[in-house]
Amino acid sequence: MAVEILMNNMWVMLGAILVILMQGGFILLECGSTRMKNAGHIAGKTIFTFGIGSLIFWACGYAFIFGENSNFFVGLSHFFYSSNELNGELSSSVFFLFQLAFATIALTIAFGGFAERAKFSTYIIFSILFSIMVYPVIAHWIWGGGWLAEHGKQDFAGSTVVHLTGAMAALAATLLLKPRIGKYNKDGSVNQILGHNQVFTALGVLILWIGWFGFNAGSTLSVSEGFFGFVALNTNLAAGSGALGALLISWLLLGKADVPAILNGALAGLVAITASCAFVATWAAVVIGFIAGILVFYSMRFFDKRNIDDPIYALSVHGTAGIWGTLSTGFFATKELATVGSPGLFYGGGFHQLGVQFMGVFASGLYAFLVSYVILFVMKKMMKGLRVTEEEETIGLDLSEHGSYGYPELVSKEKIS
């Protein structure tokens, strides 16, 4: 028994490390998908917001999610968390760090909607308010014993809690910040603003793919019976089929194998399987990922045509795929694996679980969007804008916000001045 307890804690701690490592994947993904003049800014704000998100989670985020004496929205104990008790077979401090990693990933996803135009101060203030008022409420509803948990909402590792929540905050941000300079013409036609390093983007996707084994398989919180291996298998196959789905649809419609579509297809497969990885058979994981790859291709173009500027496609990868992934358990959850909620439609469960999943998506997505929008709207009024000036945006956020350049050896002093 002592060996099993040790292994469980080692496994969950490794999962936390892998999820935190995903921040490095997001740095490369966002840097590579945007312009060189903003690279240092993106890297720096990601590290800083991970730090401030960690502090807020320690002060009150964990308490709001898992605390006792809860109300409809949050729990009300364990503030300024400090404990190393053994809860069952898992150290409470290991579980705390694992949950902290998830909370900060949601925040990083949200910042996809801020890219290349938000003030650094906007990131700081929103990090605090999102980590207090948005993420903990949804996590409490689903993972902390809240009303959606009582209804049997299935979200094993966070297609809704993490990905949809972050995406809805990103949507609120991009609507209030408005598109980047030069993204759209007066007639509404789209100008492609290409990222500066596709290799960075691909490496970021690979790091995220690896980190997802901590995200999904780590959420088993146990090594007993090796079930984490099954979850990891589903996760990997969904990512592969997501990349395949995006490749095929882009090749069919564009006549070319579009690399950004392939990369985002892999991520969409990972996002989609996050809710269902422990509840569905392996063949279903392949189907879920494949559909996610196709959906993300169309979703990217849907937002572009509506002049919603989403530089790293957070709305499509984490929002659209997050919705599909959450709903997918309502179709594919098996009788044997549905340890939460009920079997899906294809396994004799009828429409009940699908209805619960839809209710969870609607309530969580609406809450995340509305509260994020109100927070940012008030910030915009009080801060005299969320966005840098036109001149600062043109120069780049590296220089205008930080006084240094992410690639200093590539820019002469004459060009900087």
Image (spheres, rainbow, N blue to C red):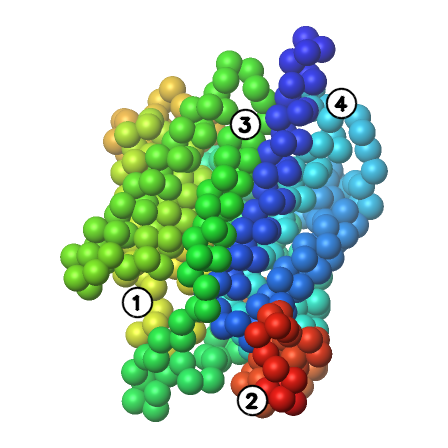
Q: Which residue is mark 1?
A: 301
Q: Which residue is mark 4?
A: 86
- Give the amino acid type for the residue marked by disc 4 in the picture: Leu
Circle 1: element type: helix
Q: CA distance from mark 3 to mark 2?
A: 48 Å
Q: Earlier in the sequence, mark 1 or mark 3?
A: 3
Quadrant holding the C terminus:
bottom right
Q: Nearer the viewer, mark 1 or mark 2?
A: 2
Number of dots carrying numbers: 4
Residue drawn at 61 percent across, 82 percent down: 412
Q: Which residue is mark 3?
A: 220
Q: Earlier in the sequence, mark 3 or mark 2?
A: 3
82 relative to 148 in the view: left or right: right
Callout 4: 10 Å neighbours few (<14), some, many (20+)?
A: few
What number is the disc on residue 187? none
Q: Which residue is mark 2?
A: 390
Callout 1: 10 Å neighbours few (<14), some, many (20+)?
A: some
Residue drawn at 70 percent across, 39 percent down: 97
